[in-house]
Image (cartoon, rainbow, N blue to C red):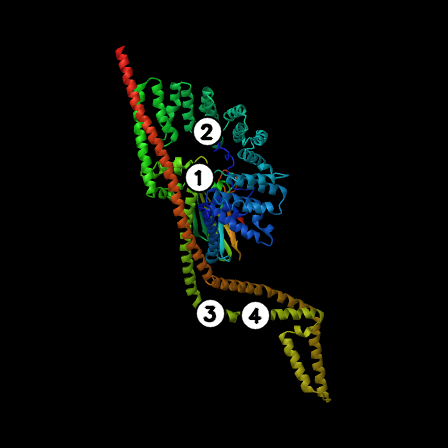
Amino acid sequence: MRATRQLIGLALALGLAVCPATGGDLRDLYFGEALYHAYQGQYFDALQRLDTELAQYHVLDEPQLDTLHYHINDAEFSVGDFELDYRMHQRAGRAIKAVLEGAVDEAVRNEAAFRLARIHFQKGQLDDALQALARIKGTVPEEIKGDLDFLRANVYIATGQSGEAVKVLVQLKSNQRLAGFVAYNLGIALLQDGRPQEAIEQLDRAGQMPASDPASIAIRDKSNLVLGTMLFESGNFERARQSLDRVHLEGPFSNQALLRAGWAEASAQQYDRALVPWNILVDREPTDAAVQEVILAVPHAYASLNLHGRAALLYGHALELFSNQIERVDASIRSIREGRFLNALIREESREDETWVIRLRNLPDAPETYYLMELMASHDFQTALHNYLDLEDLRSRLNAWKTSLDAFDDIIRLRGQNYEPLLPEVDAQFRELDSQIHIRVEQRKHLAERLQAMLTAPRPDYLATGEEQIAGERIARIEKRLGHSDDPQSLALRQRAARLRGALTWRLETQYNDRLTAAYVHLNELKAPLDALSQRYDAFVRTRQAATHSYVGYDVQIIRLRERVDDALQRVDMLIARQGHMIETVAVNQLEARRERLVAQQTEARFGVADSYDRAARAQSDAGGH
Amino acid sequence: MRGLDEQIQEIKSDSLRMSAELSQLEEKLLYPSGTQVAIFVELAKSDTMRLDAVRLQIDGQLVAHYIYSAKELQALRKGGVQRIYVGNVATGDHKLDVFVDGKLEGGADFSRTGQFTFRKEVKPKLVGLTLAGPRSGNTSITLGDW
């Protein structure tokens, strides 16, 4: 059962790949930008963008008016996902917990609980995952129902509650999207629940399910591999072979399947049939453990078929290959100890796409990476390696920030040099203009107030034209000069002056309303130029403030940031050294274990050569004797 | 003593905080809100065209010329939005010319251009461009205001 157990362990998380959350049409560009980075695996940039957006959103007075409001739950959920993808387990889930504890409706709270449970499950915190799942009550959004049940079943399997898992998975069988994963996990749950016969039948069904996408094909292959291994271990070689034969020849499980299919035949003494899968496998990548095993298995099969000459030849080839592989492992270990392994891993161009590990292994001048694929099979190594790459990425960011801070200093200094001689003169001119503008604005205000007052207390004299005012003053002067004399001439002149005043007053009184209206029209006409003036004024004030803000008040912030960046760089350097050392140690230990195995296989091959030659010679002499 | 993994997570957190502060500082120094304009690019939903390059001109000046990698194109297809340009313009109306080069599903080349006007106010200006291939039935280049 040991081989079966090893295989089962890898399949639990399949189908639970975390995807950034998006719901409906995108309304917030910065959230879209965070997703753009996340979809490229640039989780640092995605997190930085989304953290900033969320921080700004949470201090808004009216967040419902912000475009992020439409995506706020997705955004909070995505932060948790990105943090997990960026291997920040401590922080992951913090934002989701905030949603969970906030005033949200039942469906959103349930989705948050589901996502939190998923994070706990991926972190291996199974009790916390169960607790989070227990919080789900009432309405569950339709689109997560299947994933929720699947997660629940996985948590049950991982916590040994296989019976419960079986119940959930049976209900989930009709889910088309998860069909392959459900079928496989149901088989595993039945097996763990002590129902091996039902498990075999279930895995048999899982291994024959229709599949078109790579993930479904992989899980179907895995079902067949696990089933084949189980049947092989129980001595049912024929059925084991049938199951292993169904594994896709190009998939990730094909090497193991070919190896085991051959052993299933060999165990049934069908060595000629065992050679069919083994001869396919023997030509594959020689660093693969299954390929190395089959290199010895093939001559063993020929020897069992009494073809000792051919067996001797192939044992000879195996001997040569193991010697070469031991040299390669030695070269790898040497190269790793010289620090070249880590250098190869951080080559920027090597990580452009998902096949970088394979391409690195094939570099002729990089022995340090020959066994990288095998090392990458270990989850701990992968996590350690990704953390190392993250630290390298941080180091280059921190160095770039240092350069940016220097550039900011330069910008600030140059702006200061430019503005400081100019601004006093600009300010003096502005003060003069400011007072003039102020006077005009006050004048208009005063006029407006007077006109307003004239609506209730009419003052026709205020609306006299310049000529009328002069005429009125002349009449007053004449009246003054005429005094109060009673001579007829003066009397006649006073009467004429009184008629003139009367005519003037008549004009002012009768035209008052028209003049008041005209005055209002003119006052309103003043509004447009004064508004334009006010806009220009505001624009100038903004520009003037911007000039100051462009170089004043940054010193303390830049000094502090530079200190923090320097401190972080020191810490990153120290952590890179420690993490690098750890990776090298793990890699060397694994390679040394591999070397030991290769040496054992080499010895076996050496013995096989001698034995086969011996048997071949004996067979020849027996044939000669006859 | 704290574990190595814990320390790595801590430095990641610190770096994220610093990065956010630096971005704000950069924005204040280089792209103050009074003059800031940011242009974003997204693909129309379910569009199958292969976007090769986008060029942008503001008031006749080339401000961005971006050539897309397969990874970036994939991110756009999944619904990501790329901030293609951040710069400064004066308040008022500005002309934006957009040139799009790409390939159709069958491999044929296509190019599209679009001419737009946007108005810069006192607050930062966000301009969103939605691009679509000629066969999608959508307008090739659409300008949206945020």
- Residues at discs 3 and 1 both on one chain: yes
Mark nearest the camera among 4 and 1 is 1
- Residues at discs 2 and 4 both on one chain: yes
Q: Quadrant of residue A602?
A: top left
> In what element is the residue under mark 3?
helix
Residue on which disc 2 sits: A2
Residue on which disc 1 sits: A380
Query: Residue A438's mark?
Result: 4
Q: Residue at x 66, y 79 (%)?
A: A472
Vertical comparison of A106 with A283: above or below = below
How far apart are the two marked residues, 4 and 1, measured between alpha carbons?
73 Å
Q: Quadrant of residue A26?
A: top right
Vertical comparison of B111 with A239: above or below = below
* Nearer to me, A574 or A465: A574
* Nearer to me, A246 or B62: A246
Choose the circle earlier in sequence order: 4 or 3: 3
> What amino acid type should be assigned to the residue bearing mark 1?
Asp
Q: Residue at x 57, y 70 (%)?
A: A438
* Nearer to me, A551 or A80: A80
Give residue A456's position: percent from left, percent from top. Answer: 71, 69
Mark nearest the camera among 4 and 3 is 3
> What amino acid type should be assigned to the residue bearing mark 2?
Arg
> In what element is the residue under mark 2?
helix
> What amino acid type should be assigned to the residue bearing mark 3?
Pro
Label 4 chain ID: A
Residue on which disc 3 sits: A424
Choose the circle earlier in sequence order: 3 or 2: 2
How far apart are the two marked residues, 3 and 1, measured between alpha carbons?
64 Å
